Amino acid sequence: MYVNVTAPLRAALAAATEDQIIYDLAGVARRHATLLRELPGVRVRFAMKACPVDEVLTRLVQQGAGFDAASPAEIAQALRAGAPLDAIHFGNTIKSDRHIAEAHRLGVRDFATDSVEDVRAIARHAPGARVFCRLATDGAGALWGLSRKFGCTPSDAVRVMETARTAGLTPAGLSFHVGSQQMTAEAWRGAIDRVAGVVTVLARRGIHLDHVNLGGGLPAPHGTDRGGNPLDPPLDKIFAVIREGMHQLRTVAGGPLDFLIEPGRHLVADNGAIRAHVARLTTREQLGGDRAHWLYLSCGKFNGLYEMDGLQYPLLFPGHPEDAPRVPAVIAGPTCDSDDAYDPAGAPVRVPAGLASGDPVWIASCGAYATSYTTQGFNGFSPLPYTWIDGDRAGRGAPHPAAPPLAAPVTLGEVA
């Protein structure tokens, strides 16, 4: 299996003696800087849901990033991280009256929308606000398509923006999302073409936008798919298509046009890793008569590895040499839930045959959604505590209410 673990994360994993997730803040900052070099002039609004970790958010604010927030609670967390109000938008098209009013009270003035009903609610509870309308995409080419719950058609978008103007709001922009871990550049090309058509129609009707939000979907460069194959997304081509699209949209707009982008996993997935341990390696006869190995880990879908339905998380087994005998195993978490496993019909992972209960396991490329999708302690298995490294500095995050403290503190010497 393809595994990518940076030297700082590898050192921190080696120093860890208890289960935890480790975030490399310097790695996040480097990925952010690279993104700005690839897309000059674009403002970053980090999708908070991907990694709502205070230290990660604060580090991104230091880099000049803002936030795509989906709730008043996320807005409040973004403010605590030090983000200025004009660098936070309410990016969720699904908002109750109460949440619109609360976001407005907190000072947010930019709201995503995709329906006339939502626009009217924003006008009532956030008078004078700015809105940007999200266009739907089919999500083709993404590991997780976002094709039905969000977004509207181009014709609906025109109606939504005209309604916003009539209601006293500022119809400020358009947005889209091509699907999470989007693996094709064509997805952006098609979405930008649709946006260009709407920009043209709105301009004819006297609505001149000031920005386009290029949304999320930028893939993490590393990791493996369900079959264990390297993802290897065409990032150079994706960035080239986005740059060409920005030029196209500015030409169509006929005037100044700013751009935002909402990366999530692209910034954090490869900059987080989990130190877990083996619960048991077993072999059992299956109902069809074949025997299968199962490797049960101390964490799984409900406490750190939620995306196991779409990914095979890369695994490292320190203490077991690469040339040790291996067996194909289904990977599963510790809970009494059949969903807490890699798909048995998929490609089994080859693991050392000599694994014993308690052996450490390092899980790479899992910095995205590891904490945000974690349960409160399903089946009594606590959420993973987290630590962070940042060059020669290190620290421990605030413990989750259901998480026990680490057995020993992390020191600078342990992760240097």
Image (cartoon, grey):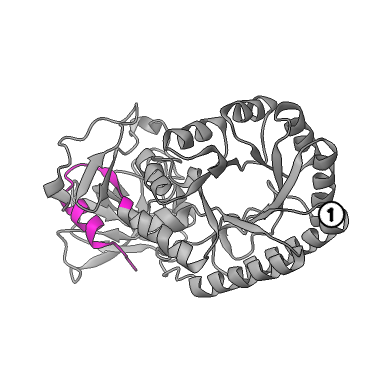
| Quadrant assignment for the N terminus | bottom left
Residue 405 image position (x, y, % from top left): 23, 31
Q: Name the quadrant containing residue 17.
A: top left
Give the secondary structure at mark 1.
helix
Q: Can residue 260 be seen in this view?
A: yes
Judge the density around disc 1: few (<14), some (14-19), many (≥20) Cα neighbours within 10 Å. Answer: few
Instruction: Please say whether residue 378 is one of the residues in the magenta stretch.
Output: no
Q: Name the residue under label 1.
A: 155
The residue drawn where x is 66% and y is 34% is: 95
Residue 280 image position (x, y, % from top left): 25, 48
Of 269 and 111, the residue lying toward us:
111
Of 36 and 194, the residue lying toward us:
36
Q: Is residue 225 visible?
A: no
User: Which residue extends farthest left?
Assistant: 413
Position of 94 with respect to 356 (left or right) is: right
Q: What residue type is labelled 1?
A: Ser
Position of 98 with respect to 219 (left or right) is: right
Of 364 and 42, the residue lying toward us:
42
Instruction: Please say whether residue 5 is one of the residues in the magenta stretch.
Output: yes
Position of 151 with respect to 399 (left or right) is: right
Q: Name the quadrant containing residue 317.
A: bottom left
- Tell me which segment is drawn in magenta: 2-25
User: Which residue extends farthest front?
Assistant: 255
